[in-house]
Image: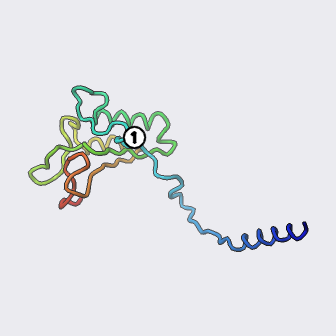
């Protein structure tokens, strides 16, 4: 019995000495994982604002989500990212080769929406694809790196 307790104690001490202390910066970075809201899981590629105006990917929807995150305590709990997923752009690039938001669904443009989101104390992000097209067939960034 004494030998058993002694062995357990020695093993515990050995393990304690093998554990190397970790050095961390106390700079406030990455105290939590990145937290926020992304449109894909709930709204997918719903772009029909005539049949489903309350649930289509639009400026109105993202402003409503930004208001909700800011006013209902989510932002203060750390949910600071609002990210537009696929299907936000026009199906074709501009003549100059730029991606452009669908102007029927985002009539004031992406800069307006980003400014609105930032004024709510949130961070704005957008999905695109490095290839020729996105998963849903909208233009990607291939040969048009941002």
Q: In front: 110, or 47?
A: 47
In this view of the protein, which residue sits in the foreground, 85 or 6?
6
Indicate the quadrant where residue 136 lies. Answer: top left
* Horizontal and vertical percent position of residue 45: 27, 39
Residue 24 image position (x, y, % from top left): 58, 66
- In the picture, the quarter occupied by the C terminus is bottom left
The residue most toward the right is 2
Residue at 91% x, 68% y is 2
So how many labels did they put on this image? Answer: 1
Q: Residue at x 36, y 33 (%)?
A: 64
Q: Is residue 49 above or below residue 95?
A: above
Where does the image place residue 117, in percent across and percent down from the top left? 35, 42
* Residue at 22% from the left image edge and 60% from the top image edge: 145
Residue furthest to the left in view is: 95
Foreground pick, 46 / 26? 46
Q: Which residue is mark 1?
A: 120
Q: Position of residue 53 (x, y in %)?
A: 27, 27
State left or right for residue 41 relative to residue 98.
right
Q: What element does badge 1 sit on?
A: loop
């Amino acid at each position: 019995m004494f030998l058993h307790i002694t062995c357990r104690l020695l093993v515990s001490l050995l393990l304690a000495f093998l554990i190397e202390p970790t050095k961390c910066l106390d700079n406030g970075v990455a105290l939590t994982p990145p937290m926020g809201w992304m449109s894909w899981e709930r709204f997918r590629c719903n772009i029909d604002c005539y049949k489903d105006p309350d649930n289509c990917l639009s400026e109105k929807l993202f402003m409503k989500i930004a208001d909700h995150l800011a006013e209902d305590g989510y932002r203060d709990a750390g949910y600071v990212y609002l990210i537009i997923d696929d299907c936000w752009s026009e199906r074709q690039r501009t003549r100059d080769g730029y991606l452009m938001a669908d102007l029927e669904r985002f009539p004031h443009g992406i800069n307006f929406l980003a400014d609105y989101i930032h004024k709510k104390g949130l961070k704005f992000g957008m999905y695109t694809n490095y290839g020729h097209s996105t998963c849903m067939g909208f233009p990607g960034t291939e040969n048009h790196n941002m």
